[in-house]
Image (cartoon, grey):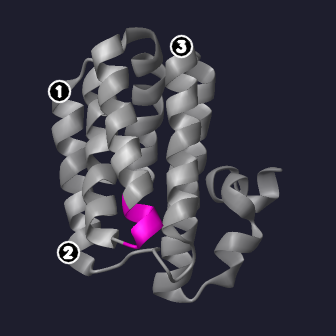
Amino acid sequence: MYKRQLLEVPAAYRAASQIDEEGLEALRMELGTMTEAARIGDEPTMMHHDRRFHEIINAASGNARLAEYVDSLRDLILTRGVSTVDTTRSLDEIVMEHQAILAGLESGDGDSAARMMKEHLVNTSALLLQQEGGRDSALSLGWEGLVVGESQR
């Protein structure tokens, strides 16, 4: 997940100034489908459209190679069979994180889009670490503690 943070945060920043109305509409459609899937508890559909949401942002950054690479990183997580859904957060919580990212993109505010992407990815990372290793300390540090480190605060 750390690699995704390094790649997708700057991609969200760039996408905020480069995404066109067609791209924003595609994101709105993906988010709408995610919202409906969350409402009925359809995790496979939700995760499919979550993935597509991220692909659109990465492609809008202007770096097609990045979009392909990030997609392959997502495959690595999926092959391990780990998910944060219904173990540490709900589908609705995931949707809310994506709503915040979209709001930053719609406003053209690269700093906001990047910050919301970072919070989303760091939150996901922390929850996966906790789940995989039983490490409650990952959450007690908060997302900033994982990136900056407790001693640097």
For residue 110, what is the image quadrant?
top right
- Label 1 sits on a secondary structure element that is helix
Viewed as shown, does residue 114 lie left or right of 141? left
Q: Nearer the viewer, residue 59 or 1?
A: 59
Q: Which residue is mark 2?
A: 79
Contact between labelled residues 3 and 2, with CB atoms less than 8 Å apart: no
Q: Quick one: which residue is furthest to the bottom in this view? A: 134
Which amino acid type is marked by label 2?
A: Thr
Q: Residue at x 26, y 79 (%)?
A: 80
Q: Residue at x 26, y 69 (%)?
A: 44
Viewed as shown, does residue 46 lie left or right of 121? left
How far from the left and from the top, in percent, is residue 32? 39, 44
Q: Which mark is residue 108?
A: 3
Which amino acid type is marked by label 1?
A: Ala
In 3D space, how far apart are the residues under numbered discs 2 and 1 (Cα atoms)? 23 Å
Q: Which residue is mark 1?
A: 64
How far from the left and from the top, in percent, is residue 52? 26, 44
In 3D space, how far apart are the residues under numbered discs 2 and 3 (Cα atoms)? 35 Å
Does residue 20 appear anywhere in the picture?
A: no
How far from the left and from the top, in percent, is residue 16? 46, 17
Q: Residue at x 67, y 56 (%)?
A: 143
Q: Earlier in the sequence, mark 1 or mark 3?
A: 1
Q: Is residue 39 magenta?
A: yes
Vertical arrangement, residue 136 with respect to residue 35, above or below: below
Q: Earlier in the sequence, mark 2 or mark 1?
A: 1
Which amino acid type is marked by label 3?
A: Gly
Q: Which mark is residue 119?
A: none
For residue 53, what is the image quadrant?
top left
Vertical arrangement, residue 29 with respect to residue 22, above or below: below
Q: Nearer the viewer, residue 43 or 83?
A: 43
Q: Residue at x 17, y 27 (%)?
A: 64
Q: Which residues are magenta?
A: 37-41
